[in-house]
Image (tube, helix red, strand yellow):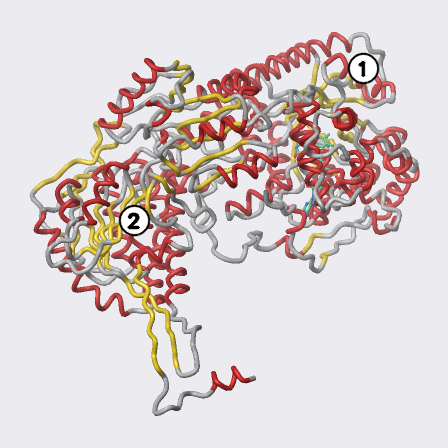
């Protein structure tokens, strides 16, 4: 396992503050001091004094970053270990997570002194029990009950302390429609049960009344995305339709019962759509006068001020206020990591002080508009709260229009102090089992132990109060470019479809390309189109009545012309420097960036790939150009590091000659472009024979290369029949290298035929062949099933299972088999199969009639040899195949062993991890594999023993990125080095060494001799 860097370590350096003195500052300071004074001797002081184990866990975590990561990872996987009850497993995981050399906490060491090999001993059992009890205590601190009855006791106690509540049901990630429906049902039930209880509660005026208005005693907090498992900003229409109705049902029922409803805010990607949907529903005649509803805004978002201003305008027009709960935001680490990984602008501020500054600004704007929007200020930061109270006092804001909110178990004393000042305080009360509640608990633990957290800072005795309460500033670097680059190769960023501008541009390109259907594309030799006699149609696999383009097929004579053109161009092309050739390729990359949406649309239409995946393919094609350009410069600069006195040894590379690229249809742009530009970067000339089903995209590659000004003959686009033109070129004596990606049968044939020395051939051909796979994901007993189900589903059914890296088998450890399978089936059922141009589509067609027929044949075998547990109806106007899940199979049978390039997934089971790994390794292939596990020793074993070229741990198996995940396998999966990796280009080159005797008549340049004598 690799050590992880916490994102808190990668924030940008601080810079000059931009201080704007606030008219509320003096009062803010006074109120903050008053609250702090009232809280001395609070929770955090108890942490220092009493030191129960759960307190100690927090203290250890705060003292050592490595321990913090390991401890929270252990806690995260605890519920998966026999429902948190398997003591031997817990003990074993304690050793694996905590007994590392870097962790030097004596008390912890003594807890772990039972030894690695002895997880069943009485001492181990005691240690495991102690830990589970401590984690339960920790959970109880932040989760107000395991069930509604316990939760009711907690809220009744809060009410006795004059604190209101908003109830939140902890849930697993909603990954299927039954789960989404169950979520709504449970909320309706919770509201009914709580309202029934509330009837017996005596009034607490401070929270139940405001001026003359009776306030709802029961409030629930819900997440909009939990109403629809496929909540997707790329598909606003379907998402809106699917979540609006449950929201209406909830609001209707709430009114009937006299409850209030508050909508939480989740990840940034969902934010704009969430706001849009809520505004729309709340404007409907049935709901437009409701004031007992709330919306959440997150102050850590850079665009939150605009959102607030938009909400104010909306509320003015609506004429009835709703509540806005202002929080800072709970997903900072996640948002930051995602932005880094995707190469996107960071949506959150990168300095804590900027978040605080912005938050106070939002508080000010919101409170200054309190007649249009009620304010709920949700924070545990005394300074932030004091600022709000100072404004409330200055503006004499009525009681109804302002309240303070906090999370259960966080900053209890602060809240009491604020309640004692007469303000309404509401506590956000999550309840439910620990397993579904784990991600919530981890978020709270992270927040409480983060260096930047106010709660944590407030217990630092060394920190002067003035510093703790100082006015926050907006760091200047937070106002500028928010993208942070890592050193080294930077991958092209995919389009972020959460941004409506990107979405609209893409939709436009999809229509535009549709209007260009039916054109003719023929071979281009020497930069000139050539006449052909035979044509085939390239169909839209999603709708076979549509001809995407007519393809002119080259004949043998034209293949010969292509060879002649390449031979002629080669001497000049090879003499260019790597940088000169690289500049052409960098220009190609730029052109593809400019034509990104259009190229995405061609991929979508010609090979039936849904838009997000097609866009990612364009990124990959761009990456290949830039990466190989750079790699050629690195590799091809001559080195003479083995110089001896009187002797120079120079290691140089030269291109091989003419490269034949035979590319597949499944990544028609990226793979064809990748293999071609690798050859070009290395100084070879290229003849591209694209897959017949994807020849329009082949023509687009030609267009892009021509637009970049590539000299004639260097690249030839030669669509044709594989069996004719392809076979002719494979055996051609002037071809030096064949780069092939496709089926094992064809790959093996090419390998064999290329090996035969032809008359007049003066070299042996080099073959790079990336062939099939039977890719397996192993699900261990400690896996996070929320993650595993989604990861397997996307890996198996994304692009209808037609990626080289698609998962086609999953081996599940028995202990979690039933649960995993049930959730996988339901989750997959919610995937929409249909036309890829529709943003709601998650699974498109297979490539053609033959693929469809072949898959149906396999499905019949699956029916006969196993049990099909999921099949769904599919449209009939294209080559569709339902996502199909098969169980009860022989791990060595046809369905478990043969490559099926389609959305067919075999689910196998094994008694334990060892046997699961053995099954994973039992195929002829070794391309990609995956493991979902939170057991460090199993992860380590997978590193060593899982026989695949690309292994993915705790993530899906598709979506390899150039340079970050160079791609390719071994065994029968192929021959050659990994595409997009540091060895790839070497295959297109011949290494040479030149040794020059630099002595003349016994004398030689002296510098080396002198330096040897130094
Ligand atoms: C009633 C209630 C409801 C809530 N509902 C939601 C919700 O729906 N959605 C949601 O996302 N959160 C929600 N939260 C959670 C809330 O966002 C966090 O608890 C809160 O951010 C903690 O902020 P603070 O002011 O208490 O603490 P502070 O310690 O003052 O601030 C912590 C905040 O600073 C941010 N931060 C930390 N480091 C940096 C950095 N380097 N750069 C920039 N920012 C940084 C953190 O992400 C966090 O948001 C809710 C909170 C409350 C009280």
Residue at the location (32% across, 30% down)? Answer: 901
Give the labeled residue for mark 1: 153
Q: 103 or 356, which lies in front?
A: 103
Residue 197 x %, y %: 77, 9
Q: Is residue 705 left or right of residue 925?
A: left
Label 2 crowding class (10 Å Cα cut-off): few <14, some 14-19, many 20+? Answer: many
Q: 984 or 246, which lies in front?
A: 984
Residue 175 x %, y %: 52, 23
Q: Quadrant of the C terminus?
A: bottom right
Give the image quarter of residue 570.
Answer: bottom left
Q: Quadrant of the N terminus?
A: top right
Give the labeled residue for mark 2: 768
Residue 403 x %, y %: 78, 29
Report the number of discs.
Answer: 2
Task: Identify the secondary structure beneath mark 1.
Answer: helix
Residue at the location (65% across, 51% down)? Answer: 11
> Earlier along the polypeptide chain: callout 1 or callout 2?
1
């Amino acid at each position: 396992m690799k050590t992880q860097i916490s994102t808190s370590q990668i924030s940008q350096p601080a810079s000059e503050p931009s201080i704007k003195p606030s008219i509320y500052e003096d009062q803010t300071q006074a109120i903050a001091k008053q609250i702090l004074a009232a809280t001395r001797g609070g929770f955090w002081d108890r942490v220092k004094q009493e030191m129960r184990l759960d307190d100690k866990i927090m203290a250890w975590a705060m003292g050592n970053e490595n321990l913090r990561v390991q401890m929270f990872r252990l806690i995260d996987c605890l519920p998966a270990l026999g429902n948190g009850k398997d003591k031997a497993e817990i003990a074993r995981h304690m050793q694996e997570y905590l007994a590392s050399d870097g962790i030097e906490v004596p008390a912890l060491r003594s807890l772990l002194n039972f030894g690695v090999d002895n997880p069943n001993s009485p001492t181990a059992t005691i240690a495991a029990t102690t830990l589970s009890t401590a984690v339960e205590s920790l959970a109880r601190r932040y989760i107000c009950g395991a069930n509604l009855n316990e939760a009711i006791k907690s809220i009744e106690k809060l009410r006795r302390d004059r604190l209101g509540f908003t109830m939140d049901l902890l849930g697993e990630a909603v990954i299927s429609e039954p789960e989404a429906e169950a979520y709504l049902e449970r909320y309706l039930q919770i509201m009914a049960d709580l309202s029934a209880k509330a009837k017996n509660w005596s009034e607490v005026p401070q929270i139940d009344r405001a001026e003359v208005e009776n306030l709802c005693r029961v409030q629930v907090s819900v997440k909009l995305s939990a109403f629809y498992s496929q909540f997707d900003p790329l598909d606003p229409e379907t998402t809106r339709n699917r979540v609006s109705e449950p929201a209406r049902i909830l609001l209707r029922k709430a009114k009937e019962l006299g409850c209030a409803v508050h909508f939480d805010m989740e990840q940034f990607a969902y934010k704009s759509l969430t706001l849009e949907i809520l505004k729309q529903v709340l404007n409907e005649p049935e709901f437009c006068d409701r004031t007992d509803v709330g919306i959440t805004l997150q102050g850590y978002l850079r665009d939150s001020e605009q959102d607030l201003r938009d909400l104010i305008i909306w509320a003015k027009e609506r004429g009835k206020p709703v509540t806005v709960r202002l929080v800072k935001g709970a997903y900072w680490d996640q948002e930051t990591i995602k932005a880094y990984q995707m190469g996107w602008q960071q949506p959150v501020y990168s300095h804590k002080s900027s978040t605080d500054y912005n938050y106070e600004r939002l508080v000010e704007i919101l409170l200054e508009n309190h007649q249009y929007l009620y304010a709920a200020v949700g924070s545990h930061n005394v300074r932030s709260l004091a600022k709000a109270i100072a404004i409330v006092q200055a503006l004499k804001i009525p009681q109804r229009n302002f309240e303070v909110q906090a999370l259960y178990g966080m900053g209890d004393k602060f809240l009491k102090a604020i309640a004692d000042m007469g303000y309404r305080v509401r506590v956000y009360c999550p309840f439910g089992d620990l397993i579904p509640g784990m991600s919530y608990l981890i978020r709270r633990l992270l927040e409480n132990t983060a260096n930047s957290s106010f709660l944590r800072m407030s217990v630092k005795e060394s920190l002067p109060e003035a510093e703790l309460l100082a006015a926050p500033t907006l760091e200047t670097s937070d106002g500028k470019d928010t993208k942070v680059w890592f050193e080294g190769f930077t991958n092209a960023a995919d389009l972020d479809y959460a941004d409506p501008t990107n979405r609209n541009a893409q939709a436009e390109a999809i229509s535009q390309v549709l209007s260009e259907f039916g054109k003719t594309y023929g071979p281009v030799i020497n930069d000139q189109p050539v006449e052909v006699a035979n044509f085939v149609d390239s169909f839209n696999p999603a709708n076979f009545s549509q001809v995407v383009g007519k393809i002119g097929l080259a004949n043998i004579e034209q293949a010969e012309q292509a060879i002649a053109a390449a031979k002629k161009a080669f001497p000049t092309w090879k003499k260019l420097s790597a940088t000169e050739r690289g500049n052409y390729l960098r220009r190609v990359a730029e052109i593809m960036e400019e034509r990104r949406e259009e190229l995405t649309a061609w991929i979508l239409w010609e090979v039936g790939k849904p838009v997000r995946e097609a866009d990612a393919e364009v990124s990959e094609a761009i990456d290949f150009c830039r990466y190989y350009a750079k790699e050629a410069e690195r590799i091809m600069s001559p080195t003479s590091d083995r110089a001896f006195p009187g002797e120079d040894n120079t290691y140089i590379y030269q291109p091989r000659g003419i490269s034949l690229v035979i590319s597949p249809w499944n990544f028609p742009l990226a793979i064809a472009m990748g293999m071609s530009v690798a050859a070009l970067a290395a100084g070879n000339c290229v003849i591209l024979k694209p897959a017949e089903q994807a020849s329009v995209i082949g023509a687009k590659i030609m267009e892009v290369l021509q637009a970049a000004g590539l000299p004639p003959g260097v690249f030839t686009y030669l669509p044709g029949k594989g069996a004719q033109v392809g076979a002719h070129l494979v055996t051609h004596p002037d071809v030096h290298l064949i780069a092939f990606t496709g089926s094992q049968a064809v790959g093996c044939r090419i390998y064999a035929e290329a090996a035969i020395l032809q008359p007049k051939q003066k070299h042996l051909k080099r073959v790079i062949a990336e062939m099939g796979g039977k890719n397996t994901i192993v699900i261990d007993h400690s896996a996070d099933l929320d993650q595993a189900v989604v990861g397997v589903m996307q890996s198996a059914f994304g692009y209808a299972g037609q990626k080289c890296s698609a998962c086609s088998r999953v081996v599940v450890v028995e202990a979690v088999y039933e649960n995993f399978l049930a959730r996988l089936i339901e989750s997959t059922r919610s995937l929409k199969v249909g036309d890829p141009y529709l943003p709601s589509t998650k699974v498109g067609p297979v490539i053609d009639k033959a693929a469809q027929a072949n898959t149906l044949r396999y499905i019949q075998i699956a029916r006969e040899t196993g049990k099909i547990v999921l099949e769904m109806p599919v449209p009939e106007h294209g080559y569709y195949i339902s996502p199909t899940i098969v169980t009860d199979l022989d791990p060595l049978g046809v369905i478990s062993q043969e490559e099926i390039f389609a959305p067919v997934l075999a689910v196998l089971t094994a008694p334990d991890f060892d046997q699961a790994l053995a099954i994973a390794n039992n195929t002829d292939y070794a391309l990609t594999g995956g493991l979902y596990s939170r057991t460090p020793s199993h992860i380590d074993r997978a590193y060593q023993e899982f026989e695949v070229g690309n292994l993915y741990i705790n993530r899906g198996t598709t979506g390899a990125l150039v340079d970050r995940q160079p791609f390719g396998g071994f065994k029968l999966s192929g021959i050659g080095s990994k595409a997009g990796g540091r060895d790839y280009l070497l295959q297109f080159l011949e290494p040479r060494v030149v040794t020059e005797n630099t002595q003349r008549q016994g004398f030689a340049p002296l510098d080396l001799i002198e330096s040897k004598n130094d």
